[in-house]
Image: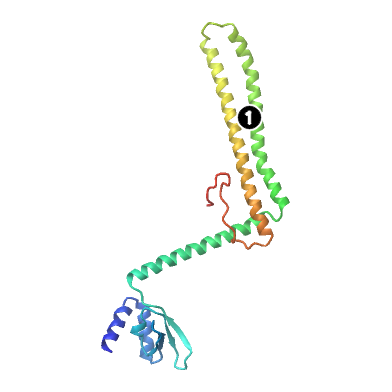
Amino acid sequence: MHRKAAAVLGLVLAQPCLLASAQADAAAGKGIYTCTTPDGRRLTSDRPIAECTAREQRILNPDGSQRATLPPFLSPEERAAKELADRRAAAERLAQQDAIRRDRTLMQRYPNEAAHQRARHLALDDANKATRLSERRIKELGVERRPLLDEAEFYKGKPLPAKLRQQLDANDAAVEAQQQLIENQKAEIVRINARFDAELARLKKLWAGAPPGSLPPLADDPATGKPAR
């Protein structure tokens, strides 16, 4: 009996809060501890039960009603593992709450497909305008280049004057820059359409009754498959 009490005390000291509660119950003569051992024996005591330190113990009132539960006493390694599991579970809960919030926000922003289509057109409008501006600028640069080419005709077989060469080079660079802008806007249009396509597929499921937060996360960039933030 003394060895069992010593074993319990050594384990309980690792958990001060639980020890204080157990001591208070024992001192008041009100705590009845009960548990079932791994081999199926049901044990009862007026103090924490040594054979059940690795198992949950119920703390009963004198009338047999349950007052509290004494969790298993954990080793430092077990306690560290449990804390890690608890942190992971908390992170998963936060991620789930965030997913629910995102879906609800998406549904509030786009209550129907018409609203989503209007948003797509607005998003594409800027990219299309930028593309048209670049195309217009390329035409203007073509007009600016004609007199330079006419002047260059006078120097066939001869080195061009430095100023004329600089003007032609600058014109070439400006055209190339506008062409690059057009390619960038084309890529942006693809990205925008991919994002809205993915959103629409998700919204159709949400509109059909899928619970917010129950679907896989949207990618930030469906065209490349990058994970959501």
Q: Where 127 sits versus 99, above or below?
A: above
Residue 77 quadrant: bottom left
Report the residue at 60% width, 8% height from top: 153
Q: Position of residue 193 (x, y in %)?
A: 64, 44
As drawn, which residue projects farthest toward the bottom? Answer: 63
Residue 224 quadrant: top right
Q: Where 187 sits versus 205, above or below?
A: above
Q: Quadrant of the N terminus?
A: bottom left
Q: Nearer the viewer, residue 35 or 118?
A: 35
- In this image, 3 relative to 127: left or right? left
Q: Position of residue 59 (x, y in %)?
A: 43, 86
Q: Where 73 sits versus 170, above or below?
A: below
What is the image's colouring? rainbow
Q: Where 116 sits versus 65, above or below?
A: above
Report the residue at 70% width, 48% height from top: 117
Residue that badge 1 annotates: 134
Under tag 1, what secondary structure? helix
Residue 135 quadrant: top right
As drawn, which residue projects farthest toward the front? Answer: 39
Q: Position of residue 35 (x, y in %)?
A: 41, 85
Q: Position of residue 161 (x, y in %)?
A: 52, 9
As drawn, which residue projects farthest toward the right? Answer: 114
Q: Amino acid at mark 1?
A: Ser
Q: How many residues crowd around disc 1 within 10 Å: few (fewer than 14), some, or many (20 or more)?
A: many
Report the residue at 71% width, 52% height from top: 113
Report the residue at 47% width, 92% height from top: 64
